[in-house]
Image: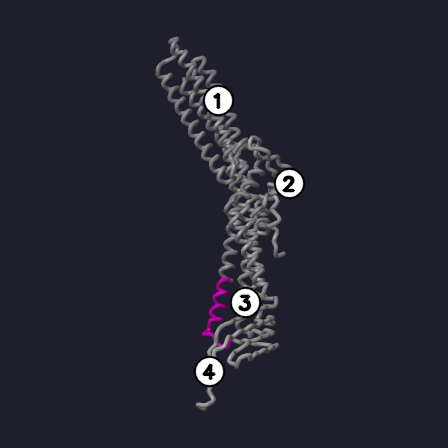
Amino acid sequence: MHSKFLLSSCLLMSGLSQAASLEESVAFAIDYSPEILAQYSRYQSVVRDGDAASGLYMPQVNLYAAAGYEETRYNSGSKLDTDDRGLTRTEIGVKVSQLLFDGFKTTSNVDRLTFEAEAERLTLISRAENVSLDVVRNYLDILKAETLLELSKRNVKEHQEIYQDIQDKKSKGLSSNSDLAQISARVATAQSSLIAAQNNLFDLQTQYLRLVGKPAVNLVYPRFDYALLPSSSQVALEQAVENHPEIKASLLDIDAARKEMRREKGDYYPELKLELHANKNDNVSNPPGGVDEDARLMLTMDYDLFNGFSTDSRVESSAWRVEEARAIRLRTEREVREGTQLAWNAYKMLEQQKSLLQQNVDAAKIAELGYIQQFNVGRRSLLDVLDAKVEVFLARRNFISTEYDQTLAAYRVLNAMGMLTYALRIEHPEEWQGENK
């Protein structure tokens, strides 16, 4: 598949040193994805199968030719009237046939493959939606990991500053060994958290390289268009059921299964063809120089009167595939509804959490500042100050995680509705627009 995705806005991609937007990353990932390439190949294969089936509407022309040696023996019944001879035999002929009626097998098969091709095209779009969500999740996780890494660095720096202050006080006899040991332990814990944050970021960057095909450099926080979100979960569910490509594809699979059943029923009918034959043979069971030429135009009928109930079995088999397709459509709709409801619930709950966690950050910071002031006048212990710093660090970390998770939940809602690539202003290439429309 040689195709590139077009962004509605102008994208500057002159080098990896420039900022990589979320839209750019998704566009690169879709074009790079082996999963999407495989599905595109599947779609094109079914389209070509439909073209091959349509060929039966056209006249079929066959040329036959043969040359070889023929040994003939003629005996009229009398010992005196015999003739044995070897001859060079040649045959050449052409047959032109036009299908007139086959019990609607050809038309049903063409319709079946048309439905299947359109279903594969919609599945391709659904694959792009899922790959887009994978990239969005990884992109936001990297931004979150970078933010948490900076928070961890700041946490280590603050603990090291306290360590230096306690060490200075101890050298002046104003602090104890236990205080120094306490802050030393907290510095080690902060540094361990920093290493874990760095490792998490490296893992996410490796995932980005696998998804997008290039390193994660200078990622920028996306601006989500909240106007694209539905007004309620009920509206989200209705739009998801109406627009999701997987549901549309499952409906087309039902139509394709019905056409397959109609194709199998075609064996209950005779097959009618108009055939033109023209032949020229030489030395075929004839004396030397014997030329045999003929031409004929025939209306032929081929009617299978009994085939061991094979047609009945194939019809019943295809009828069960219709039922299977119906069950898959029902399952697909349930999965879409579930995914949409879960994404919507997460978005709304995280919105409430974020507000509370912001209050938590503000309160924890006020408490930390108060504890530091009280520690300086001897009213609080060092342990109280360190615990307060941990509270601030955890509150900030929880708020940052929730903020990014809420943004991801908003993108999940759009993905569940089948609208994520639309929201990212990514246009599908012309090859995806459907050749059977």
Mark 1 crowdedness (10 Å alpha carbons): few <14, some 14-19, many ≥20? some
Q: Earlier in the sequence, mark 4 or mark 3?
A: 4
Tell me whether circle 4 and circle 1 mark residues in contact (CB < 8 Å).
Answer: no
Tell me whether circle 2 and circle 4 mark residues in contact (CB < 8 Å).
Answer: no
Q: Earlier in the sequence, mark 4 or mark 1?
A: 4
Q: Earlier in the sequence, mark 3 or mark 1?
A: 3
Q: Residue at x 57, y 75 (%)?
A: 280
Residue topped by disc 2: 8
Q: Earlier in the sequence, mark 2 or mark 4?
A: 2
From where the camera sits, is residue 230 visible?
no
Residue topped by disc 3: 263
Q: Earlier in the sequence, mark 1 or mark 2?
A: 2
Residue topped by disc 4: 84
Q: CA distance from mark 4 to mark 3?
A: 53 Å
Mark 4 crowdedness (10 Å alpha carbons): few <14, some 14-19, many ≥20? few
Tell me whether circle 4 and circle 3 mark residues in contact (CB < 8 Å).
Answer: no
Query: Height in image: 135 above or below 157?
Result: below
Residues in magenta, as a range: 304-321
Tell me whether circle 1 and circle 2 mark residues in contact (CB < 8 Å).
Answer: no
Q: Amino acid at mark 4?
A: Asp
Verify whether residue 199 appears in magenta: no
From where the camera sits, is residue 6 visible?
yes
Residue topped by disc 1: 367
Q: Amino acid at mark 1?
A: Ala
Taking the image as shown, residue 194 lies to the left or right of residue 57, namely: left
Tell me whether circle 3 and circle 1 mark residues in contact (CB < 8 Å).
Answer: no
